[in-house]
Image (tube, helix red, strand yellow):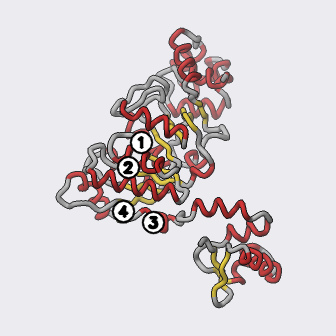
Amino acid sequence: MSEARDFVLLMSIGRLTETKLHGLLDRFKTPQAIMHANIEELSPIAGNEVARLIVSLKIDDDIERIIDIVEKQKIQIIPFYSSQYPQWLGMVEHAPPVLFMRGSLQPEDEIAVAIIGTRGATVYGKNIAENFAGDFAESGVTVVSGMARGIDTAAHWGALRRSGRTVAVLGCGLDRVYPPENRELMEEITRNGAVVSEFYVGTPPLAQNFPKRNRIISGLSKAVVAIEAKEKSGVMNTVNWALNQNKDVFAIPGNIYAKTSSGTNRLIKEGATPATSAGEIMEVLGIKYAKKERELREVILENEEKSVWETLSLDPIYLDELSERLNLATPVLLKILLGLEIKGLVRQLPGMMFVKKYE
């Protein structure tokens, strides 16, 4: 807890921006080292005012109260250099230097899709969100959303009700439940995924926080699925972040007369991929068998088998090309492929071509 206490103390400085904090951590490596540095060392990175605030930091009653909240609610404070920090988020531009988290992120959560939409969703939109999320969950794909009313809430529950994993990204401190009626949902998510935020404990759900948090929603995901959205909404902001991060964007077609579908219909006109099922989206992304992949990897014990399996896909590949990619002699490769075929993991096609077999 000592590093967490140090972060609570350091991040209590309101003028310490993300850019300055990232720079300080790059230079000094830990929050404790930052707080033991002198003004001359800190000023070139943080500026004179913030440097003076850092060297004069002391734990007071307010800080003790925040530390108590962090401990009681089991809030983890995860800097970008920690092994717990999701690597796939760290690769995007403007990734937060520190994440607050309840629950846990697992390696399999890298295969994730964000479901986003309006708070004022229709019954039609909520049904789609819940069904799509459930289908993603059953295929081993983590569902990411913002725990807001409407589409977000339906998506989280859709994943949970089908025994899947889901991640909620908040626009406030993790000690706040927003909206208040989602307290039970928040607790369920912490048991079956993670609730994360870049905002300091105690931060209220201010309007300006949500466009900022949207970059994390897209950053944690392989793609973004917009279900219902007005022309001007936070959904469009998330889509813009996704495009900047080179993520795929899908949109659900809607009633051309409904305001709740005006944004998603416009996205389709502007190049988003229309989708009518979760299966279509997973096919495009190549993640339809994410859960099966993980299960089958446990069956494959030999290193050479693993290499061959991971090089194969659902697209047929010629034996010679596979041999070249793996730098394996053809007789050796054929023996491995036969073993995988006996296990029911590989199928041979005419012309000495091979594909993965899932079913």
Where residue 29 sits: x, y (%)? 68, 31
Q: With 338 as the anchor, is 110 left or right in this view?
A: left
Type of amino acid under label 1: Gly
Q: Residue at x 61, y 38 (%)?
A: 80
Where residue 316 sits: x, y (%)? 61, 80
Total count of labels: 4
First reached walking from the N terminus: tag 2 or tag 4: 2
Disc 1 is placed on an element classified as loop
Disc 2 is placed on an element classified as strand
Residue assigned mark 4: 272
First reached walking from the N terminus: tag 1 or tag 2: 2
How many neighbours does mark 2 have within 10 angstroms: few (below 14), some (14-19), or many (20 or more)?
many
Type of amino acid under label 4: Ala
Residue 287 circle label: none
Residue assigned mark 2: 116
- Residue sitting at the far bottom: 351
The answer to whether marks 1 and 2 mark residues whose Cβ atoms lie closer than 8 Å is yes
- Whole-number angstrom distance, CA of label 2 to CA of label 4: 14 Å
Residue assigned mark 3: 279
First reached walking from the N terminus: tag 3 or tag 4: 4
Where residue 141 sits: x, y (%)? 53, 55
Q: With 156 as the anchor, is 79 left or right in this view?
A: right
Residue assigned mark 1: 146
- Whole-number angstrom distance, CA of label 1 to CA of label 4: 21 Å
Disc 4 is placed on an element classified as loop
Where residue 105 sits: x, y (%)? 59, 43
Instruction: Please state which of residues 62 and 55 is positioned toward the viewer in this rendering.
Output: 62
Quadrant where the image shows the N terminus: top right
- Residue sitting at the far left: 257
